[in-house]
């Protein structure tokens, strides 16, 4: 076994390596894992941010509590980062918070509310139009410089990001990672404690079968040891349907932009009979706006939140200040596990133990009845230099119809972005369930405004073209 097979002298290319948050999380997870070591090359369009993270990461090397020894190097070009890479991690913000503010808040002027705005809905679609060209470029660079590297993407819109990588470079070895299913497994573990008094259950002790697409994922089988969790979940939902479930943190959904009381998840279970395996903020956006997102008051009734982009802007300022303190040595980097499984995936791909977890991959039959090549989310088996999707079966027809609608809209969005076809992009836009309340003329007006607000990322588009409303 060579040194890399043992997890030593690895090369990781981090695209988006100037991030405050995801990059720091990776540093922490790597520092806590003693079986891996090597070099992380940080590439970011903000080179100064990558340099700051280089300093932060390298400060960890000499610490006695750090068992995973890594060197960090900021580089000026993507090819420099990719040269010799065994693994590529992608975590970027496509555009700026100015564009995100348009994605989320411009539709509010038309009565369309989005709790996230990064996956579907009018915001998710326009975000995709500016993200897809970036991922085409990334895929081309990987094909040229690191064609055999494993690629782990964390960027949203997840399905379309991964789909673009494969559309550009079909032989790429890429996956999309999302922690939303983990949150549902943690809820089921809490349910066992609440309903059965069974304590100490970790989320990965809950075995689930996963089907769907990212952020609209479903579980049709769930168990803990020899306990089928579906009958218990039905009791749990019946008990907490009206008030919601927040564990010991009552009211925290009002104070945390990312929290909820699980009422959307519970409602979908009552309606469709499967466990919706994403957070309420994401699940709500896949349904007609009249269900959960009709108004801010309606959102409060369902006990989740609308994430205002101003909060993200304010949070960024706090992270910038924290990054400055960390790079100057005025604040110590606190090591804590993120709960993400990227490092565990790397270990499994190096042959350091098998792993089964949920990932986003092109459909090769792992979900029956959904289009071939569409990016779907199921469990997969990670082992030495291979990822094998696990056959998950087929969704019930009512759910499959909803999932299929979003897949076809995503495929239309992809084709529109690749061909710079404004008319085709509008056809996807107007068919999104959140836009369905608008008249064709209103939808056209909103679409034009949102494209104008993101036009600097739409090189080569004929934005003067009038769409058919």
Image (cartoon, rainbow, N blue to C red):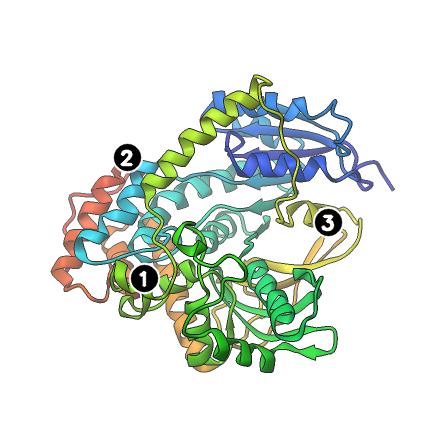
Q: Quadrant of the N terminus?
A: top right
What residue sits right under mark 3 in the picture?
A: 349
The answer to whether residue 441 is visible is yes
Badge 3 or badge 2: first in the primary sequence: 3
**Based on the displayed image, in which of its 4 quarters is residue 69 positioned?**
top right
Tell me whether the residue at label 3 lies in contact with that at label 1, contact meaning CB atoms closer than 8 angstroms.
no
Identified at 24% across, 56% down, the residue is 426
The picture places residue 259, in percent across and down from the top left corner, at 45, 55
**Label 1: element kind:** helix
Q: CA distance from mark 1 to mark 2?
A: 33 Å
Vertical comparison of 451 with 367: above or below: above
Foreground: 110 or 86?
110
**Lateral position of residue 91 relative to residue 285, left or right:** right
Identified at 83% across, 36% down, the residue is 3
The picture places residue 78, in percent across and down from the top left corner, at 53, 30
Q: Residue furthest left?
A: 441
Q: Quadrant of the C terminus?
A: bottom left
**Label 2: element kind:** helix
Foreground: 329 or 16?
329
Vertical comparison of 233 with 381: above or below: below
**Is the residue marked by circle 3 packed among few (<14), some (14-19), or many (20+) residues within 10 Å?**
many
What residue sits right under mark 1 in the picture?
A: 299
**Label 3: element kind:** helix
Disc number lying in front (1 or 2): 1
What residue sits right under mark 2 in the picture?
A: 456
Q: CA distance from mark 3 to mark 2?
A: 39 Å
**Based on the displayed image, in which of its 4 quarters is residue 14 positioned?**
top right
**Is the residue marked by circle 2 packed among few (<14), some (14-19), or many (20+) residues within 10 Å?**
few
Q: CA distance from mark 3 to mark 1?
A: 42 Å
Badge 3 or badge 1: first in the primary sequence: 1
The answer to whether residue 75 is visible is no
**Lateral position of residue 191 relative to residue 383, left or right:** left
């Amino acid at each position: 076994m060579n040194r890399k097979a043992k997890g030593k002298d690895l090369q990781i290319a981090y695209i988006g390596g100037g991030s405050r948050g995801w990059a720091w999380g990776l540093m922490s997870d790597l520092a806590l894992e003693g079986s891996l070591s090597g070099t992380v090359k940080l590439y970011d369009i903000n080179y100064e941010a990558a340099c700051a993270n280089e300093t932060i990461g390298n400060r960890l090397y000499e610490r006695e509590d750090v068992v995973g020894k890594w060197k960090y190097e900021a580089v000026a070009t993507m090819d420099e980062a990719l040269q010799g890479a065994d693994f590529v991690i992608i975590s970027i913000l496509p555009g700026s918070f100015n564009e995100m503010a348009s994605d989320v808040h411009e539709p509010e002027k038309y009565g369309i509310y989005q709790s996230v705005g990064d996956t579907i809905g009018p915001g998710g679609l326009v975000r995709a139009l500016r993200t897809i060209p970036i991922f085409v470029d990334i895929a081309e660079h990987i094909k040229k410089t690191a064609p055999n590297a494993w690629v782990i993407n964390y960027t949203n819109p997840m399905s379309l990001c991964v789909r673009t990588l494969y559309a550009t470079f079909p032989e790429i070895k890429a996956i999309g990672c999302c922690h939303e299913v983990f949150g549902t497994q943690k809820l089921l573990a809490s349910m066992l404690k609440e309903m059965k008094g069974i304590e100490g259950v970790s989320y990965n002790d809950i075995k689930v079968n996963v089907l769907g697409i990212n952020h609209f994922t479903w579980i049709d089988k769930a168990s803990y040891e020899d306990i089928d969790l579906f009958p218990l979940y039905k009791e749990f939902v019946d008990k907490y349907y009206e008030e919601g479930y927040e564990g010991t943190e009552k009211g925290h959904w009002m104070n945390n932009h990312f929290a909820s009381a699980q009422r959307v998840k519970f409602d979908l279970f009552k309606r469709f009979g499967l466990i919706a395996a994403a957070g309420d903020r994401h699940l709500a956006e896949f349904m007609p706006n009249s269900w959960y997102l009709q108004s801010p008051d309606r959102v409060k009734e369902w006990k989740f939140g609308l994430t205002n982009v101003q909060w993200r802007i304010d949070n960024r300022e706090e992270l910038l200040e924290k990054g400055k303190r960390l790079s100057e040595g005025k604040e110590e980097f606190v090591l804590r596990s993120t709960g993400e499984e990227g490092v565990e995936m790397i270990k499994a791909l190096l042959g350091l133990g098998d792993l089964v977890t949920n990932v986003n991959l092109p459909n090769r039959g792992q979900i029956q009845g959904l289009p071939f090549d569409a990016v779907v989310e199921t469990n997969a088996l990670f082992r030495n230099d291979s990822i094998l999707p696990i056959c998950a079966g087929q969704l019930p027809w009512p759910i499959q119809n909803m999932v299929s609608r979003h897949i076809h809209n995503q495929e239309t969005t992809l084709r529109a972005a690749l061909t710079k076809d404004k008319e085709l992009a509008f056809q996807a836009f107007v068919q999104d369930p959140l836009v369905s309340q608008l008249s064709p003329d209103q939808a056209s007006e909103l679409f034009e405004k949102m494209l104008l607000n993101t036009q600097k990322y739409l090189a080569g588009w004929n934005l003067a073209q009038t769409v058919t409303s």
